Amino acid sequence: MEVKRIYVKKKEGFDVEAKELLADIQENLKVQSLENIIILNRYDVEGITEETFKKAKNTVFSEPQVDECYIEEYPFHEKDQVFGVEFLPGQFDQRANALEECLQILAEGNRPTAKSAKIYILQGDIGTQSCEKIKKYMINQVDSRECSLEKPTNLTQKMEVPEDVAVVEGFINMTEEDSHKFYEKYGFAMDFADLQFCQNYFKEVEKRDPTMTEMKMIDTYWSDHCRHTTFLTKLEVLDIKWDLLNKVYQDYLKARDVIYENRKAKDICLMDIATIAAKELKKAGYMKELDESEEINACSIKADILVDGKPEEYLIMFKNETHNHPTEIEPFGGAATCLGGAIRDPLSGRVYVYQAMRVTGCGDPRKTVEETLANKLPQRKLTNEAARGYSSYGNQIGLATGQVAEIYHDGYVAKRMEIGALVGAAPKENVVRTRPIPGDIVILLGGKTGRDGCGGATGSSKAHTSESLTACGAEVQKGNAPEERKIQRLFRDPEVTKMIKRCNDFGAGGVSVAIGELADGLVINLDKVPKKYEGLDGTELAISESQERMAVVVAKEDADKLVAFAEKENLEATIVAEVVEEPRVKMYWRGNLIVDIAREFLDTNGDVKNATVEVLKPNEEKSYFKAKKVEDIKGKWEETITNLNCCSQKGLVERFDSSIGSNTVIMPFGGKYQLTPAMGMVARIPTLKGYTVSRNNYELWL
């Protein structure tokens, strides 16, 4: 079938996006000659009949009350500057994906192929130089590109035939010079000592050269993102010149004597220092509510919740996640996946995530493009797009965001801070945790694999350079909130969760880590992994991550039942692996064994890292904790109230729905005029059974 094209434009008065963009460009780029902007959503569709296309015009493509449609052609004026923007191949396009689903439902037939783009019409006396300036500001090369204005003859992508996974010939016999060249060529996140550690392992134990998939998999496993290498580095404390901190350090050493039978058995590291207090409290019997298991999904506690007036034991899980690097280079996708990525951890623990908090750090968004650091996105674009991305994902998946705050400081100019924190809950009896045994089956639930999920863990574990903005595009995904929502719904069914022995999310590392961590011995068939498109090679299938996928272990006899439950939620469920006795991770692709690594080697986390520590006494005059006498009260008052951090953030906060689920107790703004920001967030724990609310005596059934 031929490709059909339609342009959709907001009617006058509803074109808010275009008006906001016009004001932004005039103010931020100082292009005063720009008089007007028209934004068109352009859709190309292949695989539907003329009848379906006509039906879809005012039902799928547009809303007649607010939109105008133009079939095939739009009346462009010769004086206008026109350009279009589309996602890079491989990036998930939620608009096109939703369009395909709606058209399939409308036609009650096969799923058509659709592509979307945004067309910008610049009106006014705009020269070529100003037009290029606007394009550069609007097109983020990490995820987008300028598209052709011509209609394609077909939308079918030419199927790529990937080559077989290569063996790194000569790896175990490389000289140090050749090893350095190899290390630099592939930009590994592991350090050079780790690479040498790999060489020794494959030379002495495996007695062969590794495949490229094995090298990428090891690099992911040992990345700072997955294994917290920085926090687990062994510390040798040489000297502490600050008496106060030295006393604290001595208390830490005493605590180690209490907790560890042999103090030397546990390395001194930042992780141990950070967790020692909790371990000491637990040893003393003060943390009876702490929930512990072999699964590491999120921080969990046990609590009795009144359900229909009777106490019921619940698991409460807490999780926070930073997405500083992804948000810095692609603010919408980075912030959206900050939330989606944080949700997937407690979700893999089979709890329902019901409230979120967002805390961010940004440079001054009032600075112009000219004041932006080289090879950086403008702070205004970062803060606006990041807020749009996080709120888009949260509002779509149905998650109340109870607290939103942004801090403005020059320290965030070099790299933005993007933090998502959340809480989830579920009846404890519904969460079954048992150790997988040989013969158990691993099922992949949810979204399909694509290139947009490759390199997230290793990318966020590297030092970044001026090239990162254009070189790290594949490391930032476009989240699919409705798909993750389906997993939420599925995991609220006790019949489903009680079948699951162990679960892991498809976070950093994709199949290699999500499935690889479920059991000591695994045989994984990568040919079974569902793909967004053809052309992915074995390495990409092994390491591509996403928010919207889960790996679950079930008994062999329960596999078909779980798949049937998933189908009811319109979730794809595929058997991709089996638990085996031998403690090795094996992956097959095209029938070839491309990964065969001992669990013991993966668990080493690479070469032991060591660092020496010398702590200097801080300058007391610059101490944040030393109060200074204020001589000029009026001046200090004016300085404080004119600080950007004292401005109202109501406009930002109201982008996020805080009332989803009817569980919110404290709204983001309160007081007599509903303008006083709340200092925290509070919500009721949602239950699977009914509970009574005294106000109006209504029954709420969740």
Image (cartoon, rainbow, N blue to C red):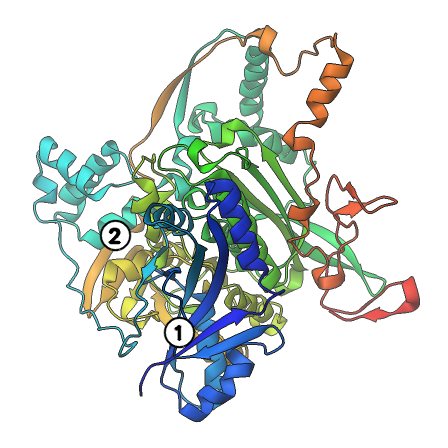
Residue that carries the numbered disc 1 in the rendered image: 574
Image coordinates for residue 454, horizontal then vertical, percent: 33, 54
Image coordinates for residue 375, horizontal then vertical, percent: 35, 37
Give the CA separation, mark 2 to mark 1.
24 Å
Residue that carries the numbered disc 2 in the rendered image: 597
- What's the residue at 43%, 90% (across, down)? 109
How many numbered marks does the figure carry? 2
Q: Secondary structure at mark 2?
A: strand
User: Looking at this view, is 81 or 366 the one in front?
Assistant: 81
The quadrant of the rendering that contains the N terminus is bottom left
**Mark 1: which amino acid?**
Thr
Please tell me the numbered disc located at residue 247: none
Does 193 appear above or below 472?
Answer: above
Residue 688 appears left or right of 261: right
User: Looking at this view, is 18 or 480 the one in front?
Assistant: 18
Image coordinates for residue 74, horizontal then vertical, percent: 42, 73
- What's the residue at 47%, 50% (across, down)? 34
Residue 563 visible in the shown view: no
The quadrant of the rendering that contains the C terminus is bottom right
Residue 71 visible in the shown view: yes
Q: Are the residues at dot 2 and dot 1 in contact (C-beta closer than 8 Å)?
A: no
Dot placed on the residue nearer the N-terminal end, 2 or 1? 1
